[in-house]
Image (cartoon, rainbow, N blue to C red):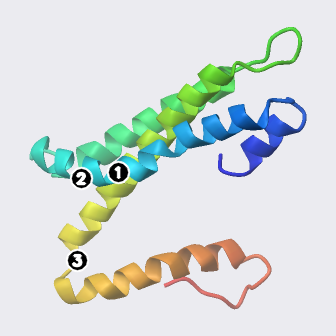
């Protein structure tokens, strides 16, 4: 949603730059506000399923529903797309994604020993990079 969708909106959809900037600003808002989500996870928890697991399951369920919503988004007879609905769906996708990110990070912190957290945090971006580069660089292995 960060690069491809705005490029599509600016190109074939011919939406103004100001509207696309507004879409990106609103859709990216949850990532800037995720620092406020972690305390909510500590306050509202369900110990029966674990402290963070219900948040991960709820975030994944919401993410699935929001992505299905993208599938039903269609253009009108003139080929224009409803930018308001697109922005709301983008906000929902990023809200659920950032919530899942906070919950998974919280699970990792609570599972790992204190001396393991630094090593695990440094490996996470390397695993992502190795997975991304794996087809052209088959010698790179993930940890």
How packed is label 2: few (under 14 Cα within 10 Å), some, or many (20 or more)?
some
In the image, is residue 17 above or below residue 34? above
Which of pointers 1 and 3 indicates the residue nearer the eye? 1
Q: Is residue 114 left or right of residue 88?
A: left
Tell me the SS state at disc 3. Answer: loop
**Residue at 13 percent of width and 43 percent of height:** 45
The tag earlier along the polypeptide, 3 or 2, is 2
**Residue at 74 percent of width and 18 percent of height:** 74
Q: Is residue 46 at all visible to an observer of this figure?
A: no
The residues bearing labels 1 and 3 have C-alpha atoms spaced at a distance of 22 Å
Q: Is residue 61 left or right of residue 41?
A: right
Instruction: Check if mark 2's residue and mark 1's residue have beta carbons within 8 Å.
Output: yes
**Residue at 21 percent of width and 90 percent of height:** 115
How packed is label 3: few (under 14 Cα within 10 Å), some, or many (20 or more)?
few
Tell me the SS state at disc 2. Answer: helix
Q: State the residue position of label 3.
A: 112
**Residue at 38 percent of width and 41 percent of height:** 59
Q: How many marks?
A: 3
In the image, is residue 69 above or below residue 5? above
Q: Position of residue 9 (x, y in %)?
A: 79, 35
Q: State the residue position of label 1.
A: 34
Instruction: Check if mark 1's residue and mark 3's residue have beta carbons within 8 Å.
Output: no
Instruction: Check if mark 3's residue and mark 2's residue have beta carbons within 8 Å.
Output: no
The residues bearing labels 3 and 2 have C-alpha atoms spaced at a distance of 18 Å
Q: State the residue position of label 2.
A: 38
Q: Position of residue 18 (x, y in %)?
A: 71, 35
The residues bearing labels 2 and 1 have C-alpha atoms spaced at a distance of 7 Å
Q: Position of residue 5 (x, y in %)?
A: 73, 42
């Amino acid at each position: 949603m960060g690069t491809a969708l705005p490029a599509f909106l600016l190109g074939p959809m011919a939406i103004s730059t100001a509207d696309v900037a507004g879409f990106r600003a609103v859709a990216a808002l949850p990532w800037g506000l995720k620092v406020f989500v972690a305390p909510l996870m500590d306050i509202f928890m369900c110990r029966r399923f674990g402290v963070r697991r219900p948040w991960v399951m709820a975030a994944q369920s919401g993410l699935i529903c929001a992505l299905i919503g993208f599938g039903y988004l269609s253009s009108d007879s003139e080929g224009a797309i409803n930018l308001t609905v697109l922005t709301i769906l983008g906000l929902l996708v990023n809200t659920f994604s950032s919530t899942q990110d906070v919950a998974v990070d919280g699970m990792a912190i609570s599972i790992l020993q204190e001396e393991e957290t630094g090593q695990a945090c440094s490996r996470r971006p390397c695993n992502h990079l190795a997975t991304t580069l794996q087809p052209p660089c088959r010698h790179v292995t993930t940890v």
